[in-house]
Image (cartoon, rainbow, N blue to C red):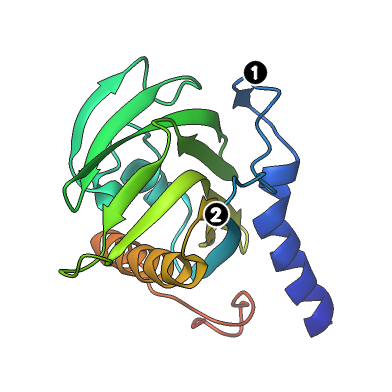
Amino acid sequence: MLAISHLALVALAILPLVSVAGQTENKHHLDPLDPKCPQGQYPGFEVNTFQFDVPAAKFYDATGSFFHSEWYSGPIASTHGKDNTPGATRNATFNGTTYRERLVEYSRSPSKLILRYTLDSGLVVFVTGAGPHDTIAFGSYTEELGLYSICAGRATYFTLTAVYCTDKVATAYDGYDRLKRAAIADVAVAVGAKVFDGTCRTAASQVY
């Protein structure tokens, strides 16, 4: 039973990238799960998953806007288009590097929220330290946020998935992991959510 439950959670994390629902940009070349990387760059894939002890609706307002993503991306310099509508773009700066992202999928219902976006400004190079070689280049990336209502509406399954082409796969993996964990932890504190392991609570157990 535990093995089946684990496989089900993994499937939930990957399924949104394979099965597209809701508003989706009509880009036939978009292959977010397995990008074709140019010479000198290599593919990366990672998923962060969390279970929180509050209803998913608490996270919707905090994380469900493409234009108001300060919780994750930092300050947004400018936007174009309509928020949460595929084709909309946002411009931001990270460690002195300006980049643009485009929304390619958005869907929202009482039981789940999916927000997927991709790099839209071509090759970007981010500074990671003070040395001349402390940089990391991304030829492309696609990220997806998924919020799922679980435990009869009393809890949330939160996923952040990233696929990318980069010159330094290990550096990218570590950097994404630290950034996502720190950002999600801050949001959880803001909405009063705590991480829990295992299954849903029952009438006989009022704690997770």
* For discs 1 and 2, the disc positioned in front in the rendered view: 2
Determine the residue positioned at 48% across, 19% down: 87
Q: Is the residue marked by circle 1 packed among few (<14), some (14-19), or many (20+) residues within 10 Å?
A: few
Return the x and y of residue 44 as percentages of the image width and height: 58, 60
Query: Label 1: which residue?
Result: 26
Question: Which amino acid type is marked by label 1?
Answer: Asn
Q: Give the answer, above or below, for where 18 lies relative to 128.
A: above
Question: Which amino acid type is marked by label 2?
Answer: Gln
- Tell me the quadrant of the picture where the N terminus can be found: bottom right
Q: Nearer the viewer, residue 197 or 139?
A: 139
Query: Label 2: which residue?
Result: 41
Discs 1, 2 touching: Cβ within 8 Å: no
Q: Give the answer, above or below, for where 130 lies relative to 144.
A: below
Using the image, tell me which numbered label, if any, was put on residue 75: none
Residue 45 as seen in the image, left or right of residue 34: left
Residue 69 as seen in the image, left or right of residue 111: left
Q: Tell me if residue 72 can be seen.
A: no
| Separation (CA) of disc 1 from disc 2 | 26 Å
Return the x and y of residue 78 as percentages of the image width and height: 21, 25
Q: Secondary structure at mark 2?
A: loop
Determine the residue positioned at 74% across, 75% down: 6
Q: Give the answer, above or below, for where 76 lies relative to 63.
A: above
Return the x and y of residue 132 as percentages of the image width and height: 21, 65
First along the sequence among labels 1 and 2: 1
Determine the residue positioned at 70% across, 66% down: 9
Q: Nearer the viewer, residue 185 or 110?
A: 185
Residue 150 as seen in the image, left or right of residue 184: right
Return the x and y of residue 133 as percentages of the image width and height: 28, 66
Determine the residue positioned at 47% across, 56% down: 55
Q: Secondary structure at mark 1?
A: loop
